[in-house]
Image: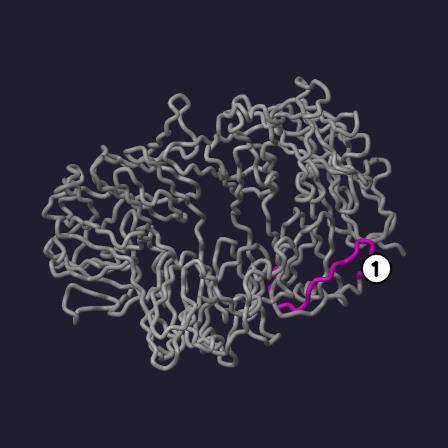
Amino acid sequence: MGCGASVVKRSGNQKKSSKPVGQQSTVQAPIIEAVTIMASLQCLMAPDEHTEDEATKMVHIIDISSGSFPEEFEDRIECNDIVEFTTKAKGDLDVFEVYKDGDDYYPVVNGYTLRNIKSRSPENDRRLMFPFALTQSDIDLYFCIIPSLQRQTIEKARKCPKAYCEKNILKIQKAEIKFPLTDEKENQKVFLHKGESIDIEWITTRNTGYRIEEKKYCPVSDGLYTVDRSSDNVSTRYLSKGKFSKTFTELGMSFLCRMNDKNQIHDMIACIVHEAFKVKHIEIVDDKIEPNIIWVQQNDWVRFAWKGKRKQTVVQIEPFTVTEIKQQSIELKTSDENFFWPHEPSRHGCMYHQFVATGIYCFKAGDNQIGTIIVEPHKNIYSIQVFGDSYTHKINTNDFIQFQWKTTDAQEELLQITMDSNSSVVPDIAGGLTGVFDCALHKCSKIEQIFRHYFHTCEIYLLNIPQHGLYNFAYSDKPEKSLISVIVENGVDNHRVAYNEENSFEPNPLIINRFDQVWFDSSSANIAAIYRTDEHGNPYESEKPLFQPQPNSINYYMQEFQTLGVYYFSTDINSNNKKKQEQTPTQPLAIVVIPEIRFHYTSIGKDNFNSDPIITNINDFVIWEFNEIISHRSAQLRSNGTYEELIGSHERAIPGRHRQCLAVECTIPGTFFFTNPDFERVNGSVNNRLFSTIIIDPPFSHNCFVTSGHEFVPHVLYISENDTVSWALGNNQKNHQISVKLSEADEGQDQESFIDLNIAQYIPGVYHLHTFNKQGQYTIRSHRFDSTALVFVYSETNIRNEKRQLQEPKILETIDTVSDFGKQIHFDCPNRNAILYYTLDGSTPTRRYENVSRYDPKQGVCLLESGLHILRAYSTEDNRISSAIITSRFVFVYEK
């Protein structure tokens, strides 16, 4: 084939029939699958037109006019192929999947079903698709064909007539994807499913031989790097006759390059793994489940089948806990919620179940063997047309982007997809673009001209961006060609914690974002139960184990955290070992759940500019989306800058590549002002300087103690049940160890009661956190001084019934963008006895540093410093929950 040609997975017509060859046809229309499993597979076919990959799907036509499959039907049906039924019978026919038990046939639970097939039925209503991810070479599927009028009779009897089933067998086989190569250059591309394999064989008569290298393209360096396959026993020698095999276990794109004896690329095969099979298969044979653990994606199906000497069943069980008395698995048999075999145990059986939600699912077979199904978030493929009209796209870290183009649209130069490092914005912790894509782990080589030409004609590039941020892609070296911006929001992150026989956890503490998942892995032979505890490792009185090991199970434990706060965990390993009981107890695992990483979007268009401050948390991103193409970066202003600096701020805005959005990461607490000449140009403003204000608050700053050298400020906090309180350090203070005790149980200072979470390195501006999950009065102490503070925790019911929630204050005067020196501002507070605190620098007034002032209604707030200011305030009162914080627009105080 010529350079860039597409290869189907095997030779032959796309549509195979049990009829004469002259009656074959091509794929013409999308499939509308049948009820249950087929209905959920509609997304595998394009709704209006076929993609290049979908055109390679094989369609096998089976004539069922006689009520059974033709005896001469011998097509090789592979995974993801389509079977289409035709009939000339007078009456309607039903086709549904059955399983064989001895000489009897029974309907498969939730199996494949087509109903009311007739000669004039639409093509789409007569088709089945088989996207099976097989671990074995093939599986046999049995089908029953009945007149539709007999449907109710057979459903009541459950057993299907043997004559309607015994000849109707489809053998579904793993796909064979083979490439026989000669000395001719054959650049090709193939679309694959995750789990499929490629076999390459070659023979040469011209030189010393070839070898195959798997290479990947790096858009950061615009280079190629070789995938290490030293563990796969792949030969690195040049062979005149050789073989190469590769199984693709992940989505993505690779290039299998045939290298000549001069270590140059002879030709290559582009492997685009852009889809996963939607049906996984589990085989249960007597005392074995194969595989006993599988990973699937949301909305995938699992086919359970068993065939053996012992009677089997399948029933979902609680994955993490057992019964209290007998310590047995807890079976779950609620219809429409759980999956289970609805009939008596049998030696043969088959059922399907679709897994919609992420999580860990366990099931028990008839011999008490336990299998595990881990459901991961669905991975979407987001298509981007390089020469389209849209320059901004949004995905998340679980997704893949697929750049597509036509060579006819890019005839001026060879197209290459590269990242623009100057305008892309990635998290500081990632270490830049090279850190995001692990460039330090692979050595990129300069691209050969043959690859650049082939990449151009390939017309597709697929990749995943594993880190959130703004990524700008260039497809041309010409600066006037606009960048394509891909905004990658943070998906669900998975964290792993290891614990051992010493009841120690690593890492500890663990800082995660809300909605993240934590997996607990035991490095001990004795897997222990896991409990929620207090900060000292003491299990709560009413707390049952979160996780208990079960016999015959892999014993995974995972928890998703949907609420902010600090959570402590410990195991029962020490309590089960008398020798360990005498040792010093270890600290429990502390998991600190901070706010999720949010993306704040601001749209800028004609007469559309919002100057309200954008209030964010640390690690958030702010995205400015423009309705027109822009060419400047934003410039940051000093809050105490002069009026002349404000007017001349555009001179510091650096020109850059054309694009349509800008971004900034929120890394440290504070108030920041940004200006850009494109703000005014796109908005249409000619007389003003438009500013975008970003306020970055530390997490958990609403309920906060500031610790000085001798006291806590404030002395008392009133909060709601399950609220989290933070501790911040005053000027030049060292970390304090903090003790939190219910006042009714307070027995004074106990050295073991003081805790130092040591989290300042993970959460800037915070050195301690405590989540109050029980109402009452608590005494707060530091190991550095004797004075104490109090925290009163109220239930939601008490707050509502006693009307303890304060309303937020209001600013009485209108605050202009530019204000005269000495202007006064006043507040109105609905609660007469409330005390107001405020700041003028945009910082959080709930953190009582020196910049926080107490409001005096007689004097008001006086603007006595020139520069940019943001007014923030809140109200507080004894025995009441503090109000929310109000925030003004920015004001520039001009001293004439």
Q: Residue at coordinates 58% horizontally, 73% vertically from top-left?
A: 481
Query: Is 23 located above or below residue 398 in the figure?
Result: below
Q: Quadrant of residue 87?
A: bottom left
**Front-lying residue, 354 or 852:** 354
Instruction: Using a 10 Å C-alpha cutoff, classify the residue at mark 1 as few (fewer than 14 neighbours), some (14 to 19) or many (20 or more).
Output: some
Q: Residue at coordinates 22% horizontally, 59% vertically from top-left?
A: 84
Circle 1 sits on which residue?
A: 643
Q: In the visual, does 709 lie left or right of 240?
A: right
Q: Quadrant of residue 610?
A: bottom right
Q: Which residues are magenta?
A: 625-646
Describe the element under mark 1 as helix, strand or loop.
helix
Residue 438, magenta (yes or no): no
Residue 634, magenta (yes or no): yes
Give residue 300's position: percent from left, percent from top: 36, 48
Q: In the visual, does 119 lie left or right of 516?
A: left
Q: Residue at coordinates 75% horizontally, 62% vertically from top-left?
A: 688
Quadrant in which the N terminus appears? bottom left
Residue flagged by tag 1: what amino acid is it?
Answer: Tyr
Give residue 744's position: percent from left, percent from top: 67, 17
Quadrant in which the C terminus appears? bottom right
Q: Is residue 51 visible?
A: no
Query: As drawn, which residue projects farthest toward the right?
Result: 896
Q: In the visual, does 91 lie left or right of 121?
A: left
Query: Is 649 located above or below residue 2 in the figure?
Result: above
Q: Is residue 358 visible?
A: yes
**Front-lying residue, 237 or 482:** 237
Give residue 135's position: percent from left, percent from top: 31, 52
Q: How many marks?
A: 1
**Front-lying residue, 121 or 592:** 592
Give residue 692's position: percent from left, percent from top: 70, 56
